[in-house]
Amino acid sequence: MDRVALGTSVTAACIRIGNFMNSEVYGKPTNGNWGVIFERDDLIPRHPTQLYEAAAYLLIFVTLLFIYKSNKIKRQNGLMVGALFILMFFARFIIEFVKENQVEFEDSLSLNMGQILSIPLIILGIAIIFFSKKSKNIYS
């Protein structure tokens, strides 16, 4: 699973680029020069959150690749998967602050559903790394 974690972040980045091309899952309105107009929905410049997530996931890929190839980091079973969960869902949690809510009931919540669902997965990533320290190292 640790080796699969490398490709997962690249796959997620490709999915977000597809979301951008399809004008899906976009951000809140912005006055910044980086705002993108999604003509299918309205003519308001919005945060291109799909591109923010794609960039974050590619940065996570680079980080995981560094961990995988590094001789200085002690790797144990689960380190890559745990790091993927922590990094990917932390990035999503942060980016959700500038993302439009996808369903109406989220408007009444202090955190949106993407953030609420990210929290247990971040905790799962921490647990995977913590409990994997007790397993044998397959990279030795």
Image (tube, grey):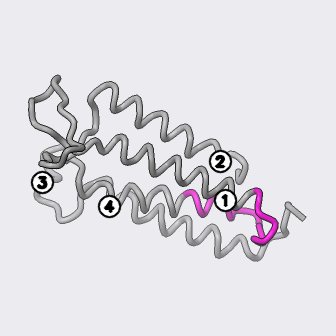
Q: Which residue is mark 1?
A: 80
Are the residues tagged 1 and 3 within 8 Å (C-beta)?
no
**Mark 1 or mark 3, which is nearer to you?**
1
* Percent position of residue 118, x then y: 40, 59
Q: Residue at x 45, y 34 (%)?
A: 15
Alpha carbons under labels 2 and 3: distance apart: 35 Å
Which class describes the residues within 10 Å of circle 1: few (<14), some (14-19), or many (20+)? many
Q: Secondary structure at mark 3?
A: helix
Chain-order first, disc 1 or disc 4: 1
Are the residues tagged 2 and 1 within 8 Å (C-beta)?
yes
Q: Secondary structure at mark 1?
A: helix
Chain-order first, disc 1 or disc 3: 1
Q: Which residue is mark 3?
A: 107
Residue 102 in view, yes or no: no
The kind of residue on which mark 3 rests is Asp
**Mark 2 or mark 4, which is nearer to you?**
2
- Residue 110 in magenta stretch: no
Residue reaching furthest front?
33
Examine the rendered structure and indicate whether residue 14 appears above or below residue 2: above
Alpha carbons under labels 2 and 4: distance apart: 25 Å
Q: Secondary structure at mark 2?
A: helix
Q: Quadrant of residue 20?
A: top left
Which class describes the residues within 10 Å of circle 2: few (<14), some (14-19), or many (20+)? many
Q: Residue at x 14, y 28 (%)?
A: 41
Q: Which residue is mark 4?
A: 116
The kind of residue on which mark 1 rests is Met
Alpha carbons under labels 3 and 4: distance apart: 13 Å
Alpha carbons under labels 1 and 4: distance apart: 23 Å
* Percent position of residue 128, x then y: 63, 67
Q: Which residue is mark 2?
A: 6
Q: Residue at x 78, y 71 (%)?
A: 72
Q: Is residue 126 left or right of residue 37?
A: right
